[in-house]
Image: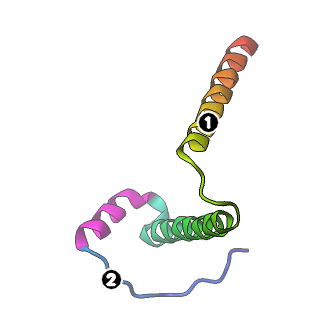
Amino acid sequence: MSDPTGKYSITMPRDIAEAAKARSGPSGLSAYVAAAVARQIERDNLNELIQVAEAEHGPVTDEEIQALRDQLQQARQQQTRGGANAA
């Protein structure tokens, strides 16, 4: 069973509303807007967690970020090679 819904009136720029309508597809504008708001809430929650972590441990350096990006890239390359070898 899905969560209960409510009806709300919102105001947004017309061009954004029209673009959202055009992209909403069969699920409709309400579902599209709800998904966008849910993603924003996730981002806000993540930003709050980052602020707490940085307050406790200090900010993440550019070097640390790059090292993690490099690790992610290597993992993706290994996955791609592993998938090609399995085929």
Residue where numbered disc 2 is placed: 11
The residues colored magenta run 14-25
Residue type, mark 2 in image: Thr
In the picture, the quarter occupied by the N terminus is: bottom right
Q: Nearer the viewer, mark 1 or mark 2?
A: 1
Query: Residue 46 sits in which quadrant?
Result: bottom right
Decide if residue 69 is on the left or right side of residue 8: right
Decide if residue 56 is on the left or right side of residue 31: right
Q: Is residue 20 magenta?
A: yes
In the picture, the quarter occupied by the C terminus is: top right
Q: Is residue 26 magenta?
A: no
Residue at 57% x, 40% y: name it: 63
Sequence-wise, the earlier of marks 1 and 2 is 2
Dominant secondary structure of the magenta stretch?
Answer: helix
Residue where numbered disc 1 is placed: 67
The residue nearer to you, when weighing 34 against 72, is 72
Residue 56 is situated, as x and y percent measured from the top left of the image, at: 70, 66
